Amino acid sequence: MITTEHINEFLKQAHRVGDAKLTICSSGNLSWRIGDDALVSGTGSWVPELKAEKVSICRIETGEVLNGIKPSMESGFHLGIMRQRPDVNVVLHFQSEYATAVSCMKKKPENFNVTAEVPCHVGREIPIIPYFRPGSPELAKAVVEAMKDHNSILLTNHGQVVCGSSFDQVFERAMFFEMACRIIVQSGMDYSVLTPEEIDDLDKYVLGKKA
């Protein structure tokens, strides 16, 4: 059952995303799984200033709106990711400054692993999705397909999507994604990346620390 406490926590996390400048004005959207349902930021809402009356409650399996508030036009991929990934509780679509600049580059990076935080938290591979109209079924299908085995993706001329088990994990993923893109842009595209062997060594270290 979704409670006022759930709504308040969702608003708090949305404002956190805005405070970090991961979204501005009406850009981006956020969702949170609660049982069989999900909270989704509403159509046209400003995530940095999200209010309770702009939070939609949707049935994950069918997309049915349960409280009469229309969800973001990107709710198709939010709910689609949750349907195929039971480990995912939070999905964030954002448009931070440097990562969005990278999404608009004619020649995009093939490798984002500029620091250890990227393969450890964002993902050693970040799929790049071609441009599809925002809110289109084609975009939703491409995002859901890419998120089957990735946690972070780049949308050409659009933005980024990250998912995870918790708000903290998703926030960290988004912030390190933006950090990597800032390094790439500020280096003038003249940057080094970790080797596969160095990334494998990180995997062993991280897994060892978690064990």
Image: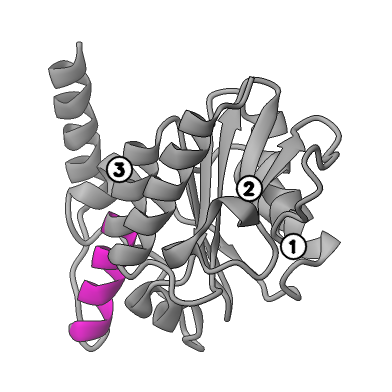
Task: Locate residue 23, reporting x and y percent.
Answer: 43, 69
The reply to whether dot 2 and dot 1 touch (C-beta < 8 Å) is: no
User: What residue is shown with label 2?
Assistant: 40
Task: Compute the Cα span from label 2 to label 1.
Answer: 10 Å
Q: Main secondary structure of the magenta part?
A: helix
Q: Secondary structure at mark 1?
A: loop
The three-letter code of the residue at mark 3 reads His
* Circle number at residue 64: none
Q: Quadrant of residue 16?
A: bottom left
Q: Is residue 67 left or right of residue 174?
A: right
Looking at the image, tell me whether mark 1 or mark 3 is earlier in sequence order. Answer: 1
Q: Which mark is residue 121?
A: 3
Residue 122: give x, y in percent of width and height.
35, 48
Q: Which SS class for mark 2?
A: strand
Q: Residues within 10 Å of mark 3 (few under 14, many from 20)?
A: some
**Residue kind at label 1, given as amino acid type:** Met
Q: Position of residue 100 (x, y in %)?
A: 44, 77
Colour scheme of this structure image? one colour
Name the residue: 20% across, 74% down.
183
Please state which of the two labelled residues, at mark 2 or mark 3, is closer to the viewer. Answer: 2
71 over 160 or under it: above or below: above
Crowd class of label 2 (few under 14; some 14 to 19; many from 20; radius 10 Å): many
Range of residues picked out in magenta:
176-186
For the point 46% across and 30% down, the residue is 5
Q: Is residue 210 visible?
A: yes
Contact (Cβ within 8 Å) of mark 2 with mark 3: no
Image side of residue 135 versus residue 174, left or right: right
Residue that badge 1 annotates: 73
